[in-house]
Amino acid sequence: MKAKTAAVILIAISLAACSGKGLMITRDGATAYRIIVPDGPNAAAYYAASELQRYLLDVSGVSLSIIPESQAGRGTAIWLGPCRRVEKAGLLPAAGVLTGDGVMIKTAGRDLIILGDGGRGLLNGVYVFLERFLGCRFLAYNCTIAPKRAILKLPPIDYRYSPPFIYREVLAFDAWRWDFHVRQKLNGGNMPLVLPTPTSARTERVPGIVIFPFVHTFAAIAPTETYFSSHPEYFGLVKGKRQGGVVGGQLCLTNPTVLEMAKRKALEWIAQRPDLTTVDISQNDAYPGSSGACECEACAAIVREEGSQHGPVLRLVNAVADAVKERYPDKFVDTLAYDYTIIPPKITRPRDNVIIRLCHYGCCFHGIEGEELSANFQPAVEQWPKLARHVWVWHYGTNFWHYLAPNPNLDSLAKDIRFYARNGIDGLMMQADIQSPGGELAELRQYLAAQMMWDPSQDPIAIRSDFCRGYYGPAAGEALEYLALMDGWKDKITRHIPTNGWNPPDITPRDFVSNGLAILEHGRAKAAVNAVIKGRIEKLLLSLWYMRLAWPETYGLSMEEGRTLLAEFKRVVKTFAVTNRTEGPIGDMDGFLAEMESRYGLLP
Ligand SMILES: [Zn+2]
Ligand SMILES: [Zn+2]
């Protein structure tokens, strides 16, 4: 009876392989397929091919060879990129309308074809194929899930997708490595510009979107130390006095020399960094309530006319963009709509080669829509895309004062990403804990953000559970239980706290910490035999240990318990090289450890 069943199954398989419906890519360690790339040098196609080869081997145990088209001969294949045969099949026009590194995956006869919008699109095509059709998951730089298959058979596929955000970037330490960044279909290339001490050499095989200089460039166009004494008129007039400075000092944007300096600097920067896609001409940072915006007669007249402080900024940026377009028609100029310039001007419209970078302002826990703190920001998100061709959002996703403190924002993060996509925002960067690993839920938060940036229609709860199952393995149940506990807490938060940071004990209840500890300790016990998973659970525990150590009275920690807990905290911090507890200077964790050692009487 058994033999008969096996025979029936074999017949069924061979019939299916011959029927033309679906592709038998590998079976029992053998394959008739090769990976074929276009002839000639093509870094993206070769890198995409090597990634496909690597993960197909993981899944099936079979290594497919990579062959340039001219040496391909006959036979079945996976075709990557614009090979002549793909062109002859008439598939390139359909791929030509993809945007934002979008992807096209199609079976044709017994071949599989993967195409994309440019080099990044082709790479994304491979990753989407692996995720969507093979069940692979790229969860963290040190955690890829590739489910094994004895038989790798594909159904007929005709899949096309272009993401709503053409720029996708997560500024988080755990998204830093280029290879992992690309696997998540992110395309920003700005981490080296914002991270003061890069942890690895930049190995970009396929360029992404590079904004250079990264931000706040008024200070570089007319440095205070160079010009303030000789040309105070270049700087903002505030309450009758010119005001310089990198923070809280701006330029007089109607001064014709300032405009010429801005144009000159933009062209200089492009010449200096030919790989940049976007040159930044943007306001300096501002102190709350003290922007430094120029109040001279000419600047003030534009502000009145435009009903917005962005008026003088945009007029200057448009003029710079015209100068850039003459010499570099493929480059963009970006500028901030941030703090005092968030409201769009009434009259002036950004040029087509201008990108508005709108900076998030809202409540950390409840998201943007209908939230009282977003009274200005929500309409700005709704209005800017109606006026500008490109509007990108700079979103804040962590507690910058306490990277380690519990942060119940996963729900609002996903909601906000959907809100941006719905309103036509076409680029998104989330800034989180950049300087150091070990931030609270850092790996999950950056994975969730990257997934939602690629396709905001996904179910964020399914993404979370996918992540926890893969990343926490035997302790996934506890990790998910902990997230559910956090959601329950979030639902009860009535305070609205603006993006930036907060004092953790102001919102974190004692029972959240104690219940969280009980759940995660249970998870740690389950993972006891697996050092990797145990370490990941300990990284989650850091967050709750941090609360107890830093606020012992609130969270009920005695001196004696503190000594034991501090030793454990320190061990995990050192194991994972957690250098930072705030968005401060690199290494500020040392100061915290010293403070705690002193508090708990552990000074050497
Ligand atoms: Zn002025
Ligand atoms: Zn709120």
Image (cartoon, grey):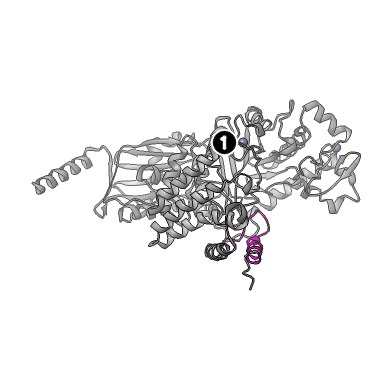
x then y, percent, for residue 387:
66, 28
246 horizontally vs 566: left or right = right
Q: Nearer the viewer, residue 351 or 456?
A: 456
x then y, percent, for residue 511:
53, 47
Q: Nearer the viewer, residue 397 or 151?
A: 397
State whether residue 224 is above or below residue 293.
Answer: below
Give yes or no for residue 41 being in the magenta stretch. no
296 horizontally vs 543: left or right = right
Give yes or no for residue 582 being in the magenta stretch. yes
Q: Could you say whether the residue bearing mark 1 is in a helix, strand or loop?
A: helix
Q: Amino acid at mark 1?
A: Asp
- Residue 240: name its quadrant: top right
For this orientation, the residue located farthest to the left is: 1
How many numbered marks are there? 1
Q: Which residues lie in the magenta part?
A: 577-598
293 horizontally vs 43: left or right = right
Res. 547 in view:
yes
Give the residue at mark 1: 416
